[in-house]
Image (cartoon, helix red, strand yellow):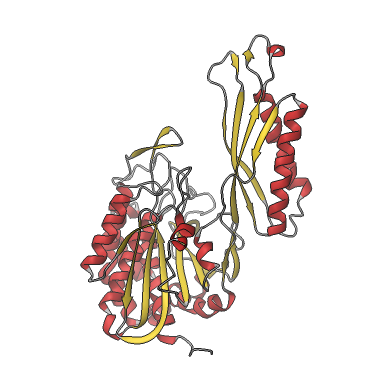
């Protein structure tokens, strides 16, 4: 029985499956709220999964979120960074301020899960028609934060402090030529009137089993930068390649030589580095050598000096290799503003780790190591103390290293992760608000 097909039974089973000591350690209000919200959170997630929207286009999703917040008696602010939604909950008692963030956007991926609520949506992305899918789990993040908001509102009178709910668009990046995501929300004043003492966020992750949580202090997720290289040759007929300059052969040589940047020019015993080509576009007909080939890809780093060196090395490889073929190259490295390293505040993480252990047990909270995936949550973490953690998404008993990964058209979320995520974010929020150290302490 696939967990996504039996929400009520599975949600109950997931609750009962939590370690007894973990349940006993949880706040009673967390246990009560999770039981009440299991079914609604599953249904919200399925609805969002069925109706995914790309970055800066999350109009329906933002509408669902805003309507939910209004129904809770909050006053949502909409249209931040195009489609972002925020709301502030003021507790009945004095206390600290926290922010809780969920991302809302989907990916240009055609779903192949076979789920009854699978997406059939399509959109135009970089000039091409593509399927749209919540292949990274942002539907889960949004549903979880909707549930946490409902739980905290129900506790308003006894709640110390204030909570800023942040439903963010375009975490995967805005469309070409547009601004978006966390950086744009901050640029439009997200923290101007509400500067939190801490911000928390989570991400469902295929490399962990359901029932596990991953967190570490310090660097967690890599800096991410895009690049664009256009190799310019001269068109000719495929039967007489000597009549032109072949940009396809030159581009292939650029791709091959670029592999030496990591393997031979970077000291990866210091920090890991990744250079990956994600798309190659050039030509339209089998017997015509085209004028140009476009290469796009990503660079992942943890060290700023290494990051800048990769930029320089890749631009140098592109230009010199193209020249060796008689071609030219225009290399934009990077071609947009990238995401910095996501760094968890060490003190905050050490303080809040026990809260996560209360939910799943100490043995199920693990250090995931450095993760080459990237997150624009990193921009918030540069402004205020932050903790970002992973929630296992792969069913228990299945090897998470062999499961379809985040961004795969077959990415599958074990829906017990919704219950774990809800409990974890709620437990962290309440523990922080109720047990915050005195000012200056």
In this orientation, which residue lies closer to the viewer: 189 or 231?
189
Of 309 and 276, nearer the camera is 309
Please give the name of the residue rendered at 46% of the width and 70% of the height, measured from the top-left corner.
200
Q: Position of residue 410 (x, y in %)?
A: 43, 44
Residue drawn at x 41%, y 69% as measured from the top left = 100
In this image, 157 relative to 420: left or right? left
Count numbered badges in the picture. Answer: 0
Q: Residue 340 or 391: which is nearer the viewer?
A: 340
Residue 214 visible to the viewer: no
As drawn, 167 above or below 178? below
Write down the quadrant of residue 304 in the picture. bottom right
Q: Position of residue 165 (x, y in %)?
A: 36, 68
Image position, residue 365 (x, y; %): 51, 70
Instruction: Please tell me in which quadrant of the rendered image residue 302 appears.
Output: bottom right
Residue drawn at 43 percent across, 41 percent down: 109
Which residue appears farthest toward the top when viewing the image?
239
Foreground pick, 397 / 153 = 153
Give the x, y percent position of residue 375: 52, 57
- Residue 359, by quadrant, is bottom left
Q: In the rendered image, is residue 94 in sight? A: yes
Task: Point out the image quarter for the C terminus.
Answer: bottom right
């Amino acid at each position: 029985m696939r967990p996504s097909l039996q929400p009520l039974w599975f949600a109950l089973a997931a609750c009962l499956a939590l370690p007894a000591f973990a349940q006993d350690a949880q706040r009673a209000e967390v246990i009560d709220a999770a039981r009440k919200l299991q079914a609604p959170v599953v249904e919200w997630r399925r609805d969002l999964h069925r109706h995914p929207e790309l970055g800066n286009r999350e109009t329906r999703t933002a509408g669902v979120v805003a309507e939910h917040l209004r129904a809770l008696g909050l006053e949502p602010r909409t249209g931040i960074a195009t489609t972002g939604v925020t709301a502030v909950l003021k507790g009945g008692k004095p206390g600290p301020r926290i922010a809780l963030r969920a991302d809302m956007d989907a990916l240009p991926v055609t779903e192949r899960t076979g789920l009854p609520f699978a997406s059939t949506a399509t959109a135009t992305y970089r000039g091409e028609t593509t399927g749209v899918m919540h292949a990274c789990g942002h539907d889960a993040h949004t549903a979880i934060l909707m549930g946490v908001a409902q739980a905290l509102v129900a506790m308003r009178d006894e709640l110390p402090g204030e909570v800023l709910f942040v439903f963010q668009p375009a975490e995967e990046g805005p469309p070409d030529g547009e601004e978006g995501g966390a950086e744009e929300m901050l640029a439009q004043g997200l923290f101007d009137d509400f500067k939190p003492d801490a911000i928390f966020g989570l991400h469902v992750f295929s490399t962990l089993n359901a029932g596990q949580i991953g967190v570490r202090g310090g660097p967690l997720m890599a800096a991410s930068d895009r690049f664009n290289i256009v190799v310019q040759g001269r068109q000719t007929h495929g039967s007489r390649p000597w009549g032109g300059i072949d940009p396809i052969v030159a581009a292939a040589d650029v791709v091959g030589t670029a592999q030496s940047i990591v393997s031979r020019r970077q000291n990866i015993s210091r920090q890991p580095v990744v250079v990956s080509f994600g798309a190659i576009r050039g030509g339209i007909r089998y017997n015509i050598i085209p004028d140009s080939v476009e290469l796009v890809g990503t660079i992942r780093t943890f060290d700023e000096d290494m990051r800048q060196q990769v930029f320089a090395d890749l631009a140098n490889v592109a230009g010199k290799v193209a020249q060796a073929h008689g071609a030219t190259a225009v290399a934009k490295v990077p071609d947009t503003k990238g995401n910095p390293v996501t760094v968890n505040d060490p003190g905050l993480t050490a303080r809040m780790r026990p809260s996560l252990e209360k939910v799943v047990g100490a043995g199920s909270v693990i250090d995931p190591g450095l993760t080459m995936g990237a997150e624009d949550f990193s921009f918030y973490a540069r402004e205020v103390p932050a903790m970002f953690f992973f929630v296992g998404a792969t069913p228990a008993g299945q090897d998470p290293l062999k499961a379809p990964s985040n961004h795969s058209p077959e990415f599958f979320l074990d829906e017990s992760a919704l219950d774990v995520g809800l409990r974890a974010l709620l437990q962290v929020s309440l523990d922080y608000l109720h047990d915050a150290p005195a000012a200056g302490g």
